[in-house]
Image (tube, helix red, strand yellow):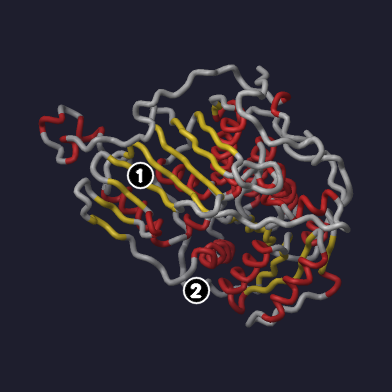
Amino acid sequence: MGNNNFSRRKFLASAATVGAAGAMGVGTLSSCTSGGESAGRGATAACDWVKRDLKFPPLLDTVPDGKILKAGVIGCGGRGSGAAINFLDGGGKTVTITALGDVFDDRLDSLRKKLLNHESKTEIADENCFIGFDAYEKVLNSGVDIVILATPPKFRPQQFEAAVKARKHVFMEKPVAVDPVGVRQIIAAAKMADAAGLKVVTGTQRRHELSYINLIKELNDNNGIGKITGANVYWNGGKLWHRNNKPDWSEMEWMIRNWVNWTWLSGDHIVEQHVHNLDVANWFIGKHPTKALGFGSRQRRVTGDQYDNFSIDYVYDDGMHIHSMCRQINSCTNGVYEIFHGTKAIATTVGHRPQIIDSEGNQLFLAEKAEISPYVQEHKDLITCIRQNIPFNEAEQTALSVMTAIMGRVSAYTGKEVTFEEMMNSDMKLGPDKYIMGDIGYMAKAKVPVPGTLERKK
């Protein structure tokens, strides 16, 4: 569809609101913390963490030797440039970058210079530099082993599917989609990647961060906080960048250069940025929520059609609630962290120090940190899994976390309770039908959503 008119999208008529009691999901520490008889027969087991088979990446400091792996970068902007450097730092002399693709030549030229100035002195041949909406196809056909997908998220599903069909290993940035149609495309391509033995890493770097892994291992192996009864997940920060329009830019060019401010390109910041925290919640809890009710607004964002704040109450199939909050507004109190409330203690990542704290404020566990940046480690893990043929594919789990974020966004935009099931079955597809570098009449139709005014169709 060509705009953000939600009246044409299919939603089930479920208007029941979530009660305020227990909305924070904070469990009261009870006698089950000590397993005493007063807790009642079976109470101790009910207070315990349910142990899971957690599959961790290799987390090697040095990648194993092997033939040189050639990578192509699709999307040469800030995140693509960062991922390219992280890839070279992670693989050292055992990897190289041989092809670049973007819709803008200035972005491609900028990354080309960065690679040449990198300690690897990576030089990209003219014939392996591609411009245009079809540049990704040319990169895939250039003889690479791995592709780094870092274009605006809207384009990710199509490019991931093409990469899998071309039998390429993939590093793709989060989020992996912006709408339900894209999420389903990612999941289908992920299954094809598994069948082909391809390795996929998705830019959810906390799953490659030693301190986070050590924390969840402590919870899983030693029943660190007992059963999780609720959580709070936050990404409250300042405004991201925006681009002012220029007279020689077409409508499409300005939107793509300004992509973090357009919902069809980024998914809004609850999808583009806050998905990190929601992914950690799904990871630690071991499943995704089944419904959401939330709100948001646009207070100070100066361009595009997105909100700049969201507050979502997510509910799981067992009735547990977590509170999700994200904001991109300057001069406010900030914080990016997660808190998991358990029957015995809490696990927290406040201050980026994953730890366990009891009800008295005593530190029971502090996770060990690694010297290697998780942004580099995720590339080391991808390279290691390729060379050692370790099955590894994060695409589907990240797609489910993205759908969690989309569910919250739609609830905030409409003011209605939204279920995971209806999102998985929704025909919602954001953005224009065709991609041309010209004026497409999109911005004239786009409107900032107003909750309570959007008709919900059965």
Give the SS element for disc 2. loop
- Identify the image quadrant of the N terminus: top right
Q: Residues within 10 Å of mark 2 (few under 14, many from 20)?
A: few
Give the SS element for disc 1. strand
- Identify the image quadrant of the C terminus: top right
Q: Is residue 26 visible?
A: yes
In the image, residue 121 sits, relative to residue 52, either above or below, namely: below
Q: Is residue 163 left or right of residue 238?
A: right
Amino acid at the residue labelled 2: Thr
Which mark is nearer the camera, 1 or 2?
A: 1
Amino acid at the residue labelled 1: Phe
Residue on which disc 1 sits: 340
The count of marks equals 2
First in sequence: mark 1 vs mark 2: 2
Residue 343, given in percent of the width and then of the height, sits at 25, 39
Q: Residues within 10 Å of mark 1 (few under 14, many from 20)?
A: many
Question: Camera-side residue: 301 or 415?
Answer: 301
Specify the quadrant of the image occupied by residue 342: top left
Q: How far is mark 1 from mark 2, CA to CA?
A: 33 Å
Question: Camera-side residue: 199 or 210?
Answer: 210
Q: Is residue 424 visible?
A: no
Residue at image position (46%, 68%) is 60
Residue 405, given in percent of the width and then of the height, sits at 56, 40
Q: Are marks 1 and 2 in contact (CB under 8 Å)?
A: no
Residue 302, given in percent of the width and then of the height, sits at 67, 48
Residue at image position (88%, 58%) is 248
Residue on which disc 2 sits: 62
Question: Camera-side residue: 186 or 144?
Answer: 186
Residue at image position (59%, 44%) is 308
Q: Is residue 342 left or right of residue 270?
A: left
